[in-house]
Amino acid sequence: MAASAPLLTHATRMLVSLLLTGSALQAIASEPVTPIQVGTAVAKHGQVSRGEILIDAGSDSGYSIPVIVANGERPGPTLALIGGLHGAEFASIVALQKLSTQIDASRLSGRVIIVPLVNVAAFDAVARHLNPVDGKNINRVFPGSVSGTQSERAAYAVTTQVIDQANYVIDYHGGDIDEDQHPYAYWIQTGIAQLDASELDMLLAYGPDYIIKFAAAGLTVETAKLLPTQAVARGKPTITVDAGRAGTYTAADLATLIDGTFNVMASLEMLDRPVKAPKKPTYIERFIYVKSEGTGTFYPLAARGQHVRKGQKIGYVTDRYGMPSFDVVAPESAVVLYLNSTPSAVQGEQLFYLGVPAQGDATQRPAKFGGGT
Ligand SMILES: [Zn+2]
């Protein structure tokens, strides 16, 4: 889509949602503005409420997930903003907490559900990727199970209490302890034209430098294990956004996440402000994990956001004594989307995440998805 193409109107978007989901139909039928409840948070029109989604104890411990709901003065769509599936991806968690304090329900059309931190145990333990309670990656166990381990019970609660109430979803990641990232976003391509187009409109409003194409045709709620694919399988246009670095963040990372989200809200006609003109993104057709040939100490020679050439030496690894072990070489010409931000190189683990930019009309040809978020 050309950068100057008009974004879909809210009415068109709601028609798309109506065609795709029964829950959207219920949402429209309940307009103009009815109270919204998520967990213990209940907001009438014009209100913001903070509460908890309670995860009961099961085979392991229970806990509560913080949730903020904002209910506008005027009708509109329901947008869910969900972060912290990975509890050490601090940039996205901090961004959602800050964003939630900036929502003015008196100026809002529709409803916003904000879940800044799903994986509370990982945040507290500064644990990368997994939930330390059960050792699982919450972003691999959707739609979850009410009778599963803590990660599965949390995924089930997010699916049934948050995603099912939403018309649109944004999934936030980025900046885990071992990830030094250039900000980017994923476009989940289902092959369902209206759904894919609605997601692309959200992405163009969000305005990332890089849009990674993520092929996901034939999704079902039984087989879609990631939060974003599960939400898409339920007919909700969903984007995944990433920013942050090495267990911390910069003001620019927060601005990318927060300003991008508010511009998506403007594009959905939830805010009474113009939509900022979208940047022209670079589409990533394929991505490549450059994995370590052995175990040792990693020294990068390329930075996030850097374009590297095929065959270029982009890092090296030494042994336990600091003696040269092997070089790390770019297998293709690509951009560095993120690199391992720690000196720890482990055989088979990724050192670089490279994206190969698309040629020609990049909006039409989905790539195979291989992992990522
Ligand atoms: Zn993540």
Image (cartoon, rainbow, N blue to C red):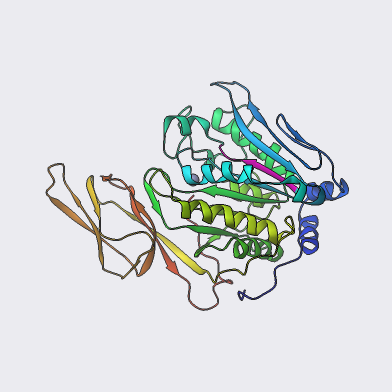
Residue 352, x across and y down, in percent: 34, 56
Quadrant of residue 272 in the image?
bottom right
Q: Residue furthest bottom?
A: 360
Question: Residue at point 51% right, 51% down?
Answer: 254
Q: Which x, y percent locates residue 27?
A: 82, 47
To which quarter of the image does residue 19 belong?
Answer: bottom right
Magenta residues span 111-117
Q: Quick check: 28 left or right of 187?
A: right
Along the line of sight, the residue nearer the viewer: 84 or 97: 97
Is residue 61 positioned above or below 253 on the image? above
User: Does 281 sit above or below residue 33?
Assistant: below
Q: Nearer the viewer, residue 311 or 109?
A: 109
Tell me, yes or no, whether the highlighted magenta stretch contains residue 113. Answer: yes
Residue at image point 35% right, 65% down: 306
Asked where in the image residue 260 lies, by quadrant, the reply is bottom right
The percent coordinates of residue 2 (x first, y second) are 61, 76
Badge count: 0
**Left or right, residue 98 beside residue 22:** left
Question: Which residue is pictured at 54% across the width and 58% down the height?
Answer: 186
Residue 187 visible somewhere in the drawing: yes
Q: Is residue 294 magenta?
A: no
Q: Give how far across and how far down residue 276 sits, in percent.
A: 63, 66
Q: Quadrant of the N terminus?
A: bottom right
- Viewer can see residue 109: no
- Magenta segment, prevailing SS (helix, strand or loop): strand
